[in-house]
Amino acid sequence: MFDGNWRSAVNRGLDPIGAVLCRLGVSADGVTSFGVAMAAVAAVVIGRGQLILGLIFLILAGLSDALDGPIAKASGTSSVRGAFFDSVSDRVCDALLFGGLAWYLGSTEPGHIFMLPLALMGVASLVSYQRAKAESLGLDAKGGLMERAERFIVLGAGLAFSFVLIPVLWAMLGLTAATALQRFAKVWRQADTMHSV
């Protein structure tokens, strides 16, 4: 949803910041790497039960993810390699954050609720895979109710208000699964149209 409706406007707002950081000698790959490091720290502090501190590092990871593109654009270093590095880094960050949540829930909640973040990680990975595979076939799988930006925002709300964290994760799982179904149907229709031509 964010990709379709707000991405271009946000990028325009971040372009001047990217230009300033570029002039200061900050590289896009460096910012991407910093974002992964922040996600790793967030995972550890969340796992240890420091959810507000985890939220701060989550925000830093999200800002890094938002700024690497504008920096690459300002420096003229946008490339296929950079896009690949950014995409792989996104998956690493997701795995770290969901792993930290599983660690936290496994330490604080009874039963098997720690599996909830792992289920969410699996469905989120499917959403990302659908887009990557569709684009490799010349199709479009963007869009959906719960893309990566939305997951960051909703997870941040869950960390800020820990008493709703588990309901928030359930809601994320349902909406992310709905996004996977939306993307599947979208690509299926496109592929069917191409087959019919």
Image (spheres, rainbow, N blue to C red):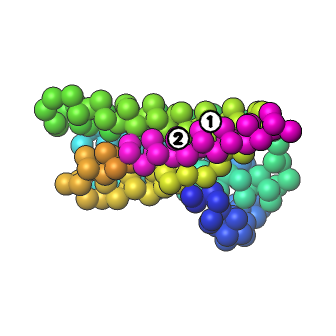
Residue 132 sits in quarter: top right
Residue 164: x percent and y percent? 23, 54
Q: Magenta span covers which residues?
A: 173-197
Q: Are marks 2 and 1 in contact (CB under 8 Å)?
A: yes
* Along the viewing direction, whichever of 71 and 151 lies nearer the viewer: 151
Q: Earlier in the sequence, mark 2 or mark 1?
A: 1
* Along the viewing direction, whichever of 177 and 16 lies nearer the viewer: 177
Residue 35: x percent and y percent? 55, 45
Residue 34 sits in quarter: top right
Q: Residue furthest front?
A: 196
Q: CA distance from mark 2 to mark 1?
A: 8 Å
Q: Main secondary structure of the magenta part?
A: helix
For badge 1, the amino acid type reads Gln
The residue that disc 2 covers is 180
* Along the viewing direction, whichever of 182 and 83 lies nearer the viewer: 182
Residue 143: x percent and y percent? 61, 52
Quarter the N terminus occupies: bottom right
Q: Residue at x 64, y 60 (%)?
A: 4
Q: Residue at x 42, y 49 (%)?
A: 175
Q: Secondary structure at mark 2?
A: helix
Residue 61: x percent and y percent? 51, 49
Residue 3: say if magenta: no
Residue 196: say if magenta: yes
The residue that disc 1 covers is 130
Q: Can residue 107 be seen? A: yes
For badge 2, the amino acid type reads Ala
Q: Can residue 60 be seen? A: no
Q: Secondary structure at mark 1?
A: helix
